Image (cartoon, coloured by chain):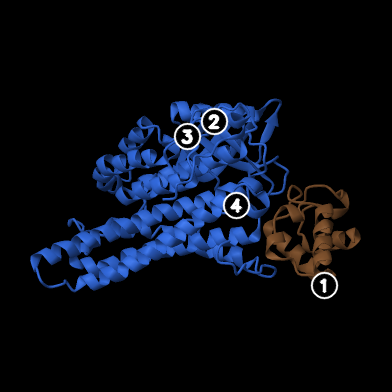
Chain colours: A blue, B brown
């Protein structure tokens, strides 16, 4: 991973109290240990029972890894997107659901760390995230025909003096029942246009979740992405001041697509590692002869390298654009991040699929150490997690004016 | 130029409320301009003024108000004339 320095927030600099940059390698090392020692041995059970990976998240909380994106001045480590991506990949290699939950949590955290440094209430909340290691979930989808189009809301914020009420029907909230707080979108007012949205932070004691549907899927079973009727009441200062359109374009889009891509990279890495182990075992059975599957493995490694380059280039582009609002809201940046999502989601399935030719029947079995069943089922979620066709459709809407930038290094 | 921009917004912007009710500096995104609507507006602006917005100008700020659009059109016109 790149040696990106921890982000130093303005306030700390103003007070000349910039602590030494956190060694992000230590954070990644701690995550890898949790991935290997806790997430991996529980992954099969999480998958089989479609249950929340509670042991893994207890360990991540214990190690302080949930609050690492919080700026140092607010008690966190100001971890970079590169660091968080690496942790997502490490967790996903052991348990894809754990990696995805961690990614979704940090995507929510990015809305706070990128846009809420000037908001008193949200600064306090970020401190709490670091101190109490709060797990954040997202309620951006809605029933009533809105579905997964998170840039439209039906429900609106009902203001009542200094308080607001919010009720949202039919929203899918991943690990909603296990979250300490939910970031929820709604129209700015009940009468506002569907796309004029805000996002509010609500703590678990400020809302009620009524489960209306259970998550029973092929893969990513541990994310527990149940459907809920959400209703809550909280002080109006908990509404993020910036329009959701800006949050969506400037931080959610890049964080979501880069962290998801990192999770899918982790799933692909799991399949590659199983294939490598299979080929090594074959080689040891017949010393002096290269196993036929080694050629396929050589080919698989080129696919994995291509995937890695895609994600790393995306991280690099975000790092260079992150302080430039015009660049972050440009069509070109959006097209690039969407291209990363599409390409990464396809690569994950392609790589796991190719691994079957290497591991053969041992990959197809559910009970072999080379089983590719869970990675395959998990990888199949990638193209439909925000459907690739929806994304391509959104991009195609821009092509009447968009001209791609031909430079290699932008 | 602002009149032309207002006409284009009314015709292509897909705004839920009449453009006449907006001041030159009102936030068009808050008024309901979606990304799809803004692309339609960009296309109509390119057509009406005979210009092409370069990639780096296709961002949210340049299309955030009637004044901002006017500024963006003038910038491209100046660049194309240079």
Nearer-the-camera pick, B40 or A265: A265
Disc 2 and disc 4 on one polypeptide chain: yes
The numbered disc on residue A321 is 4
* Secondary structure at numbered mark 3: loop
Q: Residues within 10 Å of mark 4 (few under 14, many from 20)?
A: some
Q: Are marks 1 and 3 in contact (CB under 8 Å)?
A: no
Q: Name the subunit of mark 1.
A: B
Q: Which residue is mark 1?
A: B50
Q: Secondary structure at mark 4?
A: helix
- Dot 2 or dot 4: first in sequence order is 2
Tell me the CA gap for discs 1 and 4: 30 Å
* Residue at mark 2 to residue at mark 4: CA–CA distance: 23 Å
**Could you tell me which chain the residue with mark 2 belongs to?**
A
The residue sitting at 54% across, 50% down in the picture is A319
Q: Which mark is residue A18?
A: 2
Separation of marks 1 and 2 at Cα, in angstroms: 51 Å
Q: Are marks 4 and 3 in contact (CB under 8 Å)?
A: no
The answer to whether any part of residue A77 appears in the image is: yes
Chain label for disc 4: A
């Amino acid at each position: 991973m790149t040696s990106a320095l921890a982000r130093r927030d303005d306030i700390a600099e103003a007070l000349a109290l910039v602590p030494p940059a956190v060694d992000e390698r230590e954070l990644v090392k701690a995550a890898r240990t949790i991935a290997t020692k806790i997430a991996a041995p529980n992954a099969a059970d999480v998958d089989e029972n479609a249950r929340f990976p509670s042991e893994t998240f207890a360990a991540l909380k214990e190690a302080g890894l949930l609050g690492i994106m919080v700026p140092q001045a607010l008690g966190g480590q100001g971890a970079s997107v590169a660091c968080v991506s690496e942790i997502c990949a490490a967790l996903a290699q052991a348990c894809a659901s754990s990696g995805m939950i961690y990614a979704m949590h940090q995507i929510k955290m990015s809305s706070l760390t990128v846009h809420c440094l000037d908001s008193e209430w949200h600064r306090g909340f970020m401190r709490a995230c670091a101190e109490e290691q709060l797990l954040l979930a997202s309620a951006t989808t809605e029933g009533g025909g809105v579905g997964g189009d998170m840039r439209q809301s039906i429900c609106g914020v009902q203001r009542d003096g200094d308080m607001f009420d919010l009720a949202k029907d039919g929203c899918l909230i991943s690990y909603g029942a296990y979250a300490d707080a939910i970031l929820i979108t709604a129209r700015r007012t009940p009468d506002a246009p569907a796309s004029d949205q805000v996002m509010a932070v609500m703590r678990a004691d400020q809302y009620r979740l009524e489960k209306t549907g259970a998550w029973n899927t092929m893969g990513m079973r541990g994310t527990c992405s149940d459907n809920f009727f959400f209703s809550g009441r909280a002080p109006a200062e908990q509404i993020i001041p910036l329009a959701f359109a800006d949050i969506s374009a400037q931080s959610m889009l890049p964080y979501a697509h880069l962290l998801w891509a990192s999770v899918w990279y982790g799933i692909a890495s799991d399949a590659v590692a199983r294939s490598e182990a299979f080929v090594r075992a074959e080689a040891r059975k017949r010393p002096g002869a290269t196993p036929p599957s080694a050629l396929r493995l050589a080919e698989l490694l080129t696919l994995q390298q291509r995937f890695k380059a895609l994600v790393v280039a995306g991280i690099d582009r975000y790092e260079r654009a992150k302080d430039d609002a015009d660049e972050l809201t440009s069509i070109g940046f959006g097209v690039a991040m969407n291209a990363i999502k599409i390409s990464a989601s396809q690569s994950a399935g392609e790589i796991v699929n190719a691994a079957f030719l290497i591991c053969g029947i041992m990959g197809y079995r559910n009970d072999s150490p080379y089983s590719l069943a869970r990675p395959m089922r998990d990888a199949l979620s990638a193209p439909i997690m925000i459907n690739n066709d929806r994304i391509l459709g959104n991009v195609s809407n821009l092509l009447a004016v968009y001209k791609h930038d031909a430079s290699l290094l932008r | 130029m602002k009149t032309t921009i207002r006409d284009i917004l009314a015709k292509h912007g897909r705004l839920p409320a009449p453009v006449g009710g907006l001041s030159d500096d009102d936030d068009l995104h808050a008024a309901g301009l979606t990304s799809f609507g803004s692309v339609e507006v960009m296309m109509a602006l390119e057509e009406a003024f005979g210009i092409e917005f370069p990639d780096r100008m296709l961002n949210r700020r340049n299309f955030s108000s009637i004044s901002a659009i006017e500024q963006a059109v003038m910038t491209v016109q100046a660049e194309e004339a240079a």
